[in-house]
Amino acid sequence: MQQIKSAVITFIVLTILTGIIYPLIVFGFGQVFASYEANGSLVTVNGKIIGSALIGQSFTDNKYLWGRPSATGDHPYNPLASGGANLGPSNPNLLNAVTDRVNTLGANAINPAPIDLVTSSGSGLDPDISIASAYFQIKRIAKARGISEDSVENIINKNAKYPLLGFIGEPRVNVLEVNLALDGVK
Amino acid sequence: MIIAYIDLVVFLVVLTFLSIVLGRYIALVFNGRVSYLSFIERPLYKLIGNTGEMKWGQYAKGIMLFNIIGIVFVFIFQLIQGALPLNPQHLGATTLDLALNTAISFVSNTNWQSYTPETTLSYLTQMLALAVQNFLSAATGVAVLIALIRGFVAVEKGTIGNVWEDLVKSTLYILLPLSLILGFALVKLGVPQNFNNYQDVQLINPQVVSVTVDGKTTTNRFTTQTIPMGPVASQEAIKMIGTNGGGFFNANSAHPYENPNAISNWLEMLAILLIPGSLCFAFGRMVGDKRQGYTLYAVMTIVFIILAIGVMLAEFNGNPAFYHLSIDGVMNLLQSGGNMEGKEVRFGVFGSGLFAAVTTAASCGAVNAMHDSLMPLGGLVPLFLMQLSEVIYGGVGSGLYGMLIFFAVLSVFIAGLMIGRTPEYLGKKIESFEMKMVALVILVVPLLVLLGTAISVVIAPGLVGMSNPSAHGLSEVLYAFTSAANNNGSAFAGLNANTPYYNLMLGFTIFVGRYGVIIPVLAIAGSLASKKRLNVTSGTMPTHGLLFIGILIGVIIIVGALTYVPALALGPIVEHLILFK
């Protein structure tokens, strides 16, 4: 009986400490010292929230930079069903899907598609593509917008991020940031 | 690949340094030399009332009571969450089999998740039921380990410490401070911590999605995106620190809100191995011979390096099925390249490969890439790391007590047989009772894994869960039972496990895999504590140094390989041969 009482008391006290007080301290810290990040890194344009800098969106219009294939539930980039396609490397469905994407992008031997642009991401919400994948799309974007390829490339280069110290992280651009820059609003 | 080696070396140097520092601190905590939180401790012990030394039976009873209360609490919480606050999506009760599976899974430090959190559990359920167990299950692991260490240290004593004091000390002095530090860092790096409603945002480029079902095409237009929010950072921190691995979101640490960039990825990997690594050093100090700790840490690190390089190399080389397509998959200054299916651009093949090795070396189970889409040999590494009984660093507490009982004791026994001496470890004679218990735990876990897999691939409810064909389908099921029995919690997530069959089968596997080890470990602790301590003589086999490191690695690999190679041959190895033919 004494054991049960001790167990219950230990459980209740530690639950209050780790389940209520601890998350509230982190909450307080976040709201005071990092309120933009703590509230989801939301991006506002003309007073309207148009997305989160960390959560990828589906772009399909020719004038925009496209993100990676996404396998989230009933429609791509659905944050309520984050996750990958979970296709094994030997699954014929994976090969078929990748082949379709290569064809849709019009890739060929001279201008091959970067691998990250034809494979689905782990979260289905990947906000980034590689710099190679961004360069791959310059021609299409410039044509759809009627602007020079150089100006598109400039915008991509301005938003390019490189590995920290050369080995932590990967070369990439944030798709939403580049598209806002292309629209001239950010 | 040179970048991968640099990354790995820098990572291990930082990890080792931090582990030595933290190990010293942990030893001080359990030797009663740290007391800055005694203003919380003292009144709490008075309330608990029972703070005397315990025999192993009482200690084990305390652990079981504490964990069963946890299971009941988490189980009920999921069923009544609809009536509780902090539930912006008005989510109702989960199914009974799911609630039971999740409760066992979180209380046992496994954090297998067969549900999609963002559409299943409220903020309050995640924060007050699940994240709390991230702390308490880790504290349970530390407590059992400390009790075992006391068993080695004690001389002709019947007791192994007080369970309540150990649980409170682990939580207050180790888990909470580390989680606060990591939690603050993660918020600053972009992990949300709020209680806002799910956020609707206006899309710049509205989505038009056509779905064809039975020849009828329906077109849906989406002009908004609904983004879940919540107290993510606090849960994310303890999820790593406590080697739990249960994600706030379905995509786990691949989700940009859980792991926003390469720096958070690095911190999360460090956090996973930090306590398991430092416990080796704490162990050395507590038994009064630091070399014992260095030896175990060296064994873990050597095995880890080899396997981590294996998975990074497999992912770096990419998928040969795509070689004939017009794809550029070679790493260069503009892209990561390699096998990017199921991976995030910000982590690339090295950040994902290293994470996969870290999370399965420790019994964490968080994932930052979908393991189901790893290359066959890339997926074999996480599977094999778990099958080594989660002792390559392993879970918080559980990794080291596993290493000590499964392998260190077994190694001195085998070495003792070879030279015809009574085996002893740390001055304690290893006799038939200890060896029976060791044999028991070495058999329990593989039995759960192999029998569970075998049953599931011959009966219909097991077969319907597979999402990939042929050899890879077998790997999915094998991975699930390996992960459950070893309390890891990661998955080949294509397996549809949210069915009554898998929820109950895996729930049972997790429970026996956890407590079927903890109770024998405590029994051994009790038995060791009552023995006298032998002096070191010229006939004593040293359990430190290169020779013992070699023996220990040999025993770990041989036991793991003998048990699992036949099953691995039918899964990832066959798939590799088909793919690279």
Image (spheres, coloured by chain):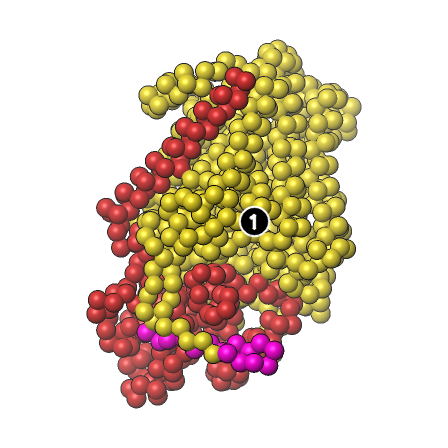
Chain colours: A red, B yellow
Q: Is residue B297 visible?
A: no
| Residue beneath the point at 28% across and 47% down | A30
Which residue, given by chain and number where applicable, does mark 1 sit on? B95
Region rendered in magenta: B204-218
Q: Is residue B196 left or right of residue B68?
A: left
| Residue beneath the point at 57% across and 63% down | A86
Query: In what element is the residue under mark 1?
Result: loop
Counting from the top left corner in percent of width and height, residue B95 is at 56, 49
Q: Image height check: is B439 above or below B84?
A: above
Counting from the top left corner in percent of width and height, residue B356 is at 54, 52
The N terminus of chain A, quarter of image: top right
Counting from the top left corner in percent of width and height, residue B532 is at 64, 12
The C terminus of chain A, quarter of image: bottom left
Residue B303's image quarter? top right
Q: For mark 1, does the 10 Å Cα neighbourhood hold few (<14), some (14 to 19), or many (20 or more) residues?
A: few
| Residue beneath the point at 39% across and 33% down | A16
Amino acid type, mark 1? Thr
Q: Main secondary structure of the magenta part?
A: strand
